[in-house]
Amino acid sequence: ILTIGSVLQYSADDDHIWGTGWNGKVPEAMFKSRRLNIHAVRGPLTREFLLIRGFNVPQVFGDPALLMPQLFPGRFAPQPKRDYVVVPNLHDLSLLSPDTPNLISPLQGWNRVIEQIMEAKLVLASSLHGLIIAEAYGIPARYVRFSQTEDLFKYKDYYFGSGRLEAEFQFAKSIEEGKEMGGMPGLRFDYRPLMDAFPLHLWE
């Protein structure tokens, strides 16, 4: 079963797909699957990618990290102490000075990263899951495009799959610009279809 992340290219025939997405920077030739059990995908762009290739894809969207508040009730809660935090994508980390104020390294343990995100009033991130975790807990977040390393596909796929429109997808190009812009339009997302689509029968 493939879930969180842009890892569709690693799927093999008869795998189960629940919330994963295509990675726009990966050569399409890497996708070799011919038979997949698709329960949900991250967003409509991934669905279109699969539909073109003849797969049956339900209109059930969402990155499973959006379910953190439901899966771990009470484990994490927003406790705003800092005006903002910066969560770079792994490939952008070296572009930022270690002295960057309020920098959260994605190399830390996932729970420590989430704890620090919970301290922010605003999350500025090129880490997709930095954005997702923030929004899942109602913290305003803005995508900051520090480099061209990551394709826009996965960000748009997530935003459109969680209820936002093309015209609302506007990213910042620097931390300062992100602070000025503030958070992007919030989630318009009902978690229940994604939760209900989980292939629990595989464990029965």
Image (cartoon, rainbow, N blue to C red):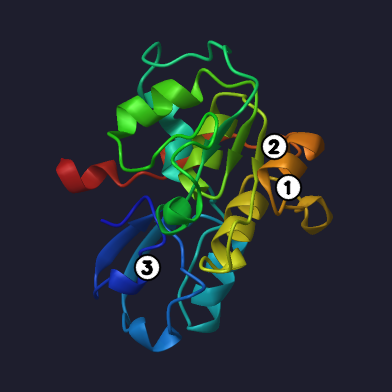
Q: Are marks 3 and 2 in contact (CB under 8 Å)?
A: no
Snapshot quadrant of residue 196: top left
Snapshot quadrant of residue 83: top right
Residue position for label 2:
188
- Label of residue 48 in the image: none
Viewer-side residue, 132 vs 96 = 96
Residue 55: horizontal and vertical position, in percent? 45, 75
Residue 104: horizontal and vertical position, in percent? 44, 34
- Label of residue 8 in the image: 3
Q: Are marks 1 and 2 in contact (CB under 8 Å)?
A: yes
Residue 133 versus residue 82 in the image, above or below: below
Is residue 18 shown left or right of residue 43? Answer: left
Viewer-side residue, 156 vs 39 = 156
Q: Residue furthest right?
A: 167
Q: Residue at x 41, y 57 (%)?
A: 20
Residue position for label 1:
164
Give the mark, 1 or 3, whose residue is nearer the N terminus.
3
Q: Residues within 10 Å of mark 1 (few under 14, many from 20)?
A: some
Q: Residue at x 49, y 65 (%)?
A: 57
Q: Residue at x 73, y 40 (%)?
A: 176
The amino acid type found where label 3 is placed reads Leu
Residue 103 versus residue 11 in the image, above or below: above
Could you say whether the residue bearing mark 3 is in a helix, strand or loop?
helix
Snapshot quadrant of residue 64: top left
The amino acid type found where label 1 is placed reads Arg
Give the Cα separation between the discs numbered 1 and 2: 7 Å
Viewer-side residue, 109 vs 179 = 179
Quadrant into which the N terminus falls: bottom left
Give the Cα separation between the discs numbered 1 and 3: 23 Å
Q: Residue at x 25, y 65 (%)?
A: 15
Residue 69 is at least partly visible in this image? no
